Amino acid sequence: MHGEYKDMFLLFVGIITITFVLPLLSVWILVKVISLAKAHPKPAKYTFITMFIILMVAAGLKIRDIYYEKSPYYFWNELIRKNPKPFNVSQEEFEVKNRAGYCWRDKKYYSKEELWHKAMKSLTGRMIYENKFYWDNKVVNDNGEFLPTADDCRRSQGCRVFKIPMNPDKEKFLKDDIENEDDFGRALDILNKRNEAQSFIFASDKNYINDDFKLKNYILIHKKDNPNYLSVYDSNSCCNVLNKSEWSLIRKNYILKYIGMETAVFTEKSKIPIDIDINSWGVGNFYLSVTYSKSITVPEFVAKDKSKTFKNTRKVYLLNNCGDVLYRPNYWWRS
């Protein structure tokens, strides 16, 4: 009930502000502007022209952003922006080197091993992107209503990604602590305080930005708003970078999906323009094959039965030449 009263109070304040305060403030500003214009007509003229230009530019940028966000090619456009064409390079040279696997942003060709580290960071960024919908209360139910998920994120220490470098001692600590205390969050909190694990909440987190993901033996734990379930990615077995030849051998086992299934997070259609060769834009020369445990419980995680845990969800993502993951569309295992 406390939350409901708070929402009602904020709604009341908003109505009062819009109905009375903003109009009065607008009138006061207008009177001041007219007075200044009469006293100093020439400077006022140039000021108004400058303000008009700024307003038009701001409006244009806002319209562009709205169009960009609503575009059916949202994720594709986002990926292309991460490896843009240099202004002093011809389109022909740009496309030729893209097809050969060149990363323009970093000015180099990457090996598959180097791409793996970058793809793992990008994959983690995808999880953080999903979590932001929960923090912003933008997850909807079957009736199209937004759910108050941010409260659940705070209450359960959820909606974040944990990266834990693994070794036998750490695995034993996690297993013992969770079995004895039945508190998964407590165990992770201890590891964080010891600097033996990291947690990422937002893409702007410094530890995420500065992490090059060069480790090989670690697990990623993607925790959403439900404290009882989590998804686990084991770096030793979850993810492989494939070239076009390797992908062609298993392509028949997968179907391409454009619309997301993750609790209405990726509900928008995310297409690739059909009239282009994606390889010419540096996409589809490499793929990231991902196998992970989806929505396992804490006891299942403790048991660590990988024969059952890490086989139920398989996806393949397109990569660009710099190791960035295309979030949508992606390939799903034919069940």
Image (cartoon, helix red, strand yellow):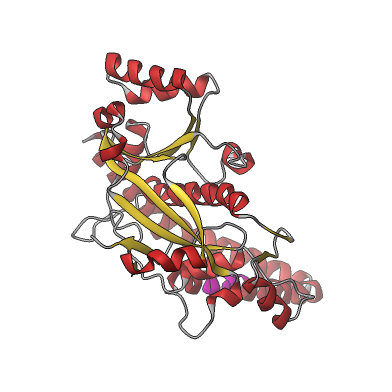
Give, as a single range, the part of the protein colored magenta: 58-64
Q: Residue 107, image x and y in percent? A: 74, 61
Q: Is 308 on the left-hand or right-hand side of 283? A: left
Q: Could you tell whether 39 is left or right of 209 in the image? A: right
How many numbered dots are placed on residues in this image? 0
Q: Is residue 160 above or below residue 166?
A: below
Quadrant including the N terminus? top left
- Residue at screen point 53% across, 23% down: 196
Residue 190 screen position, x and y as percent: 45, 19
Question: Nearest the camera: 194 or 37?
Answer: 194
Whether residue 162 is visible here, answered yes or no, is no
Examine the image and state in which quarter residue 221 appears: top left
> Which residue shows up at 53% across the image and 82% down it?
276
In the picture, the quarter occupied by the C terminus is bottom left
* Residue 145 x, y percent position in the rendering: 24, 57
Indicate whether 65 appears above or below 8: below
Tell me which secondary structure the magenta stretch mostly adopts.
Answer: helix
Left or right of 326? Residue 149 is left
Residue 296 is at least partly visible in this image: yes
Is 232 situated left or right of 284 in this image? left
Instruction: Single out the residue that lies furthest toward the left.
Output: 143
Query: Residue 25 in magenta?
Result: no
Residue 216 placement (x, y as % from top left): 54, 37
Foreground residue among 266 and 276:
276
Q: Is residue 270 above or below residue 325?
A: below
